[in-house]
Image (spheres, rainbow, N blue to C red):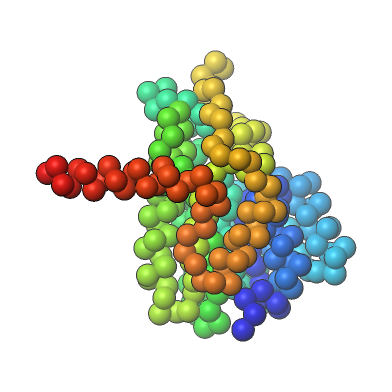
Amino acid sequence: MDPFANRVAVVTGGASGIGRALALALAREGARVILADLDEPGMAQVADAIEAGGGQALAVRTDLADLGQVQALAERAWVSFGAVHILCNNAGVSVSGGLETATYQDWQWVIGVNLWGVIHGLLAFLPRMIAQQQGGHIVNTASMAGLIASQGLGVYNTTKYAVVGLSETLVKDLRPYGIGVSVLCPMGVATEILTSERNRPPALQNPVGTKGEPVPLMGPTLTAEEVAAQVLAAIRANRLYVITHAEGLEPLRRRFQRMERAILDS
């Protein structure tokens, strides 16, 4: 069965960056797309582009940190299209700075979107996806920062490591239901993640003067469209890891060599 044609896909963080590219790529492959984001004008532009190309799209303003809103998103999806086959838990935010300077508000905000957003997506969509008995695929956006810790990104690293571990477990748990899982671990991508403070809730704002210095993105910068193409290929191949940059191989090798050496030294 074609994993995209006449299927229904939900993409969180769909107004820009990787989410936008995923939504447009899925629509080109024949999927009907539901966009979730806080950026309503951005979502409207993506939905208009999909419909101009002959596709179907629905934009739903959603705060992924709020389970009730994600449950309402799932209800809209099933009412509108009768099923969901592909769930892209893609929305993400980032803060910079050493862990010694991280604030409670930093932890609340980043965990709320990057980790609870994924968990809320699973809670709201997965039981229905299993019950409809039509298979499907879940894509969780992590980062190379979920495989290799980067100094100055400790809060972000924590959430992305959690998403990788969640995904590695989820692929085993969902195998009996015919639902595949991919975890996206990119390095540098041309997105607006470094300006994600623009969507930070007022209640979780930091005091003035506590903003950390941005951490440069690792590796060559790919376009969001290049990354989306890799994700769709991974869905077709039912492949767990989507590691976008060949430059990630050497630091990953060094990490596991250090683990091997620790075992041998013990």
Residue at 47% x, 59% y is: 241
- Residue 99, x across and y down, in percent: 39, 28
Q: Is residue 212 above or below residue 36?
A: above
- Residue 37, x across and y down, in percent: 66, 50
In the rendered view, does 260 fall on the left or right side of 126?
left
**Closer to the camera in the image, 106 or 27:** 27
- Residue 262, x across and y down, in percent: 20, 43
In the rendered view, does 54 fall on the left or right side of 110?
right
Residue at 81% x, 51% y is: 45
Q: Quadrant of the N terminus?
A: bottom right
Camera sees residue 107:
no
- Residue 31, x across and y down, in percent: 71, 71
Residue at 55% x, 82% y is: 134
Q: Is residue 225 above or below residue 205?
A: below
Which image quadrant is residue 201 in?
Answer: top right
Q: Quadrant of the C terminus?
A: top left
In the rendered view, does 219 fall on the left or right side of 176?
right
